[in-house]
Image (cartoon, rainbow, N blue to C red):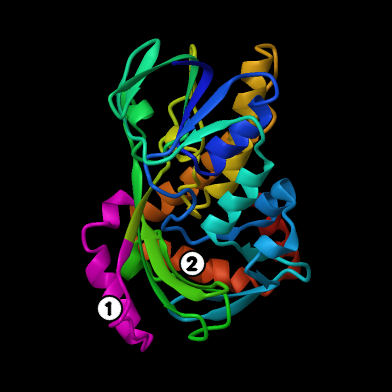
Amino acid sequence: MKYDVVIVGAGPAGLNCAYYLEKSKSVLVLEKNKTIGPKICGGGLTPNCYNYLKPPKHIIAKEFSKIKVHSIFQNRILDYKKLLMRTCDRETLANYQLKKLKNTTIKTNTKVTKITKDYILANNQKIYYKTLIGADGSNSIVRKYLKLKNNLTTTLQYKLPKDTFKDYEMFFNPFLIGPGYFWIIPHKDFVSVGCGTTKKYSKNILKNFHKWLDKQNIDYSTSKLESFPINCEYQNHEFGNIFLVGDAAGLASKLTGEGIYQALASGEDVAKKILNPKYNYKYIPKILKTNKRHKKGVKLLNHSKLLAFIDYEMFLFSLRSQKFINELIKSL
């Protein structure tokens, strides 16, 4: 069995990549799970992501023009006049992407166990490729084959009943979670209550997450704890006839944890590069520029809990200015 392009992983990056390739190449997408879409994910669509995707209304779960932001001593409202944030269920997003595919072969429940320079082994079957794309997330087997290191951000969440909270909220407390944050994100059928932080502060993340939940009087006793890693360690995405996209490439933001936009945009960029080797990447350089700025911010916040505390208090104080808010949105 041979294909022009084999894509490992049927997330937003892999499916978007297939969409741009399928008219000119024979494409196979391999997904290790039985179903495509369900994933532990906050499911937030930033303005960048929404403007890129331009999705129909039915895939949007909630829309928010305001975000409540909390530090230890302050409470502010991030008010952007226009819609600031939307939420989207990952399975709904996947179904939307799948309906756009016409000529791509997709195999689920198919795990890749071996990679060589010209074929992969999946479910004990050899599949030859001209180009291989790793779109298989933070623990990418394609990335491991390329011997690249990871830098994983730890995240945890509980899914609460849909009417538990109505507002999108973020909480900063460096003494509990370092440079990360806690969140409350309402979806259509549930509310995601979670947290994320860097490797340096991940040792006590579960203990401190529960401490924060108890302080907020949030009952999580009947909910299942979920955890998922985010890879923020970019070490190139192009390796001859092998490419990495999305989390597999380490393109998620270390500061915000956002990864859906990076996945979609890098999927398109890589597809166009495969179709035309002279193509100049449109999205990936911008993503890398933003991520570099975000990493500098995290490095500063990582240095000291006290310094992070001061920075967060100054940040919330600045949210009194609409001009600052507008500039902040543009920088994300």
Q: Is residue 200 above or below residue 64?
A: above
Q: Residue furthest bottom?
A: 217
> Dot 1 lies on which element?
helix
Q: Amino acid at mark 1?
A: Lys
Where's residue 149, x and y in %? Answer: 31, 30
Q: Is residue 144 above or below residue 213?
A: above
Which residue corresponds to the image point at 50% horizontal and 43% vertical from the top-left? 11
Instruction: Assess whether residue 215 is covered by the magenta stretch.
Output: yes
Q: Where does the magenta region start and end?
A: 198-226
> Is any part of residue 284 visible from this angle?
no
> Between residues 301 and 10, which one lies in front from this camera angle?
10
Where's residue 76, x and y in %? Answer: 59, 78
Q: Is residue 202 left or right of residue 17?
A: left
> Between residues 29 and 159, which one lies in front from this camera angle?
29
Residue with the mark numbered 1: 211
Q: Is residue 97 left or right of residue 163?
A: right
Where's residue 170, x and y in %? Answer: 50, 71
Where's residue 309, x and y in %? Answer: 41, 67
Quarter of image, res 140: top left
Q: Amino acid at mark 2?
A: Tyr
The disc placed on residue 312 is 2
Q: Is residue 120 above or below residue 255?
A: above
Instruction: Assess whether residue 186 is covered by the magenta stretch.
Output: no
Which residue corresponds to the image point at 57% horizontal and 38% vertical from the top-left? 15
Which residue corresponds to the image point at 70% horizontal and 24% vertical from the top-left? 23
Structural crowding at the residue carrying mark 1, measured as other residues with C-alpha within 10 Å and reported as few (<14), some (14–19) or many (≥20): few
